Structure formats: C-alpha cells, structure tokens
Image: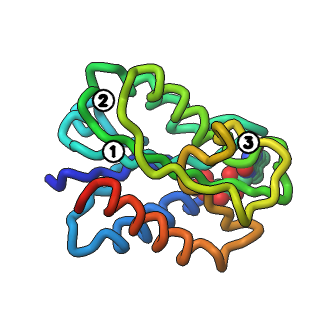
Amino acid sequence: MAKIGIFYGSTTGNTLKAAELIQKAFAPEPVDLVDVRQAAPEDLREHEVLILGTSTWHWGGLQDEWAIFEDQLTKDAVQGKKVAFFGLGDQKHYPDHFVDGMGLLYDKIKPLGISTVGMWPKDGYQYEASAAEVDGRLVGLALDDDSEPRSTPKRVEAWVEQLKKELRL
Ligand SMILES: Cc1cc2nc3c(=O)[nH]c(=O)nc-3n(C[C@H](O)[C@H](O)[C@H](O)COP(=O)(O)O)c2cc1C
C-alpha cells in the first residue's frame, strides 16, 4: 500500500483521467488510486497523504459518489494526515459555481484541524465565484476539461511538483 492515496469521484470520467495524470506525475513515488464508489473508511486510514478529487455537479454540488462518501471524512479517519484537493469543473458554463465541489470537501476537512497542502493560484482562470476560493487562492488544483482541456497536463505537472516540495518527497 502506497503512503499516498488519490480518492476520486467521477461521473463521466474526467476526474478519473486527472487522477491518473496526477498518479503518473508522482512516479516513481507509488500512489494508490481509490474510487470513492468502492472505498471504505479503512482505505482513508491506510494512507498518510490523501489527495481528494471531485467534480462539481448540480450547480455547486459534490459529485454523486462523493456526496455519499463525504460522511466518512471523520476526524478519526483523517487525523494526522496531510490532505490535498483537486477539482474538475466548467468555468464557461458554471462561472458562479466553478469547482465548488472541491470547496465543499475542503470545508469538511479544514474544521477538523487537519493540515492541508496544495493551495493553488486563481490566476489564469475566468470565473465569477467559487466555493473553492479562500483568501484569494483556490484550496487545490482546479481543472477544466470542458473549456480548457489543453491546460490540464501542464497544470497537473506544476501542481504535483509543488506538492512534492510541500510533502518533502
Ligand atoms: C448538469 C451539470 C452540472 C454541472 N455543474 C457544474 C458546476 O456547478 N460547477 C462546475 O464547475 N462544473 C459543473 N459541471 C461541469 C462538470 O463538473 C465537468 O464536466 C467535469 O469535468 C465532470 O467531471 P467527471 O466526469 O469526473 O464527473 C456540470 C456539468 C453538468 C453536465
């Protein structure tokens, strides 16, 4: 079992694709991919670093399987871990709710006193409002495979490099 686990929820496959890119960018560091559709609370406990990835649906809501699994993000399951976030969204069609789902996961984790990594600048995105924006920054990596698919690989590369430094890998 790798110490890093990517927990993703994906309806049409975009978040899964991003999770796989993130996994590759960490190589040779081993990273587990866990679909929250099949995940159990023990899967969270088994990893020291949790990378939580969700898309946003229903105008500002969590991806459907995440909406079920989010209750497993208890203090007991995540304490002592480092947690990072990434979110898939569509800034052109949902500019008032861009990657809100990522913000919802952050709001679940942050009050537990958990240490988070991977904050990301909002430069280069065009949206009106996002629940994932805190103090002028995004709480994690935002990806938009609907409006800017070509930006995804380089954003992933840069974010993972940042994470490696923050995690001292
Ligand atoms: C009905 C519908 C609602 C959506 N709502 C939002 C939204 O509120 N905010 C956002 O950023 N993206 C929204 N999206 C875009 C999806 O998050 C985006 O397509 C994402 O890449 C899907 O990833 P997935 O295939 O991993 O679930 C929505 C898409 C659809 C079809």
Question: Under 8 Å from ligand 1: the CB of mark 3?
Answer: yes
Viewed as shown, does residue 65 lie left or right of 126?
Answer: left
Q: Under tag 1, what secondary structure?
A: strand
Q: Which residue is mark 3?
A: 130
Viewed as shown, does residue 123 lie left or right of 34?
Answer: right
Residue at 73 percent of width and 37 percent of height:
60
Q: Which residue is mark 1?
A: 50
Quadrant of the rendering where the C terminus is positioned:
bottom left
Residue at 81 percent of width and 59 percent of height:
126
Q: Where is residue 23 shown, x and y percent of the image?
A: 35, 66
Amino acid residing under circle 1: Leu
Viewed as shown, does residue 28 lie left or right of 154?
Answer: left
Residue at 45 percent of width and 49 percent of height:
8
* Mark 1 / mark 2, whichever is N-terminal: 1
Characterize the local packing of mark 3: few (<14), some (14-19) or many (20 or more) Cα atoms within 10 angstroms. Answer: many
Question: Under 8 Å from ligand 1: the CB of mark 1?
Answer: no
Disc 3 versus disc 2: distance between alpha carbons?
Answer: 25 Å
Disc 1 versus disc 2: distance between alpha carbons?
Answer: 8 Å
Amino acid residing under circle 2: Val
Q: How many numbered discs, if any?
A: 3
Q: Which residue is mark 2?
A: 78
* Circles 1 and 2: CB atoms closer than 8 Å: yes
- Tell me where residue 96 sits by quadrant: top right
Nearer to me, 135 or 130: 135
- Tell me where residue 141 sits by quadrant: bottom right
Residue 95 - label:
none
Q: Where is residue 19 shown, x and y percent of the image?
A: 44, 61
Q: Where is residue 24 shown, x and y percent of the image?
A: 35, 73
Viewed as shown, does residue 107 lie left or right of 165?
Answer: right
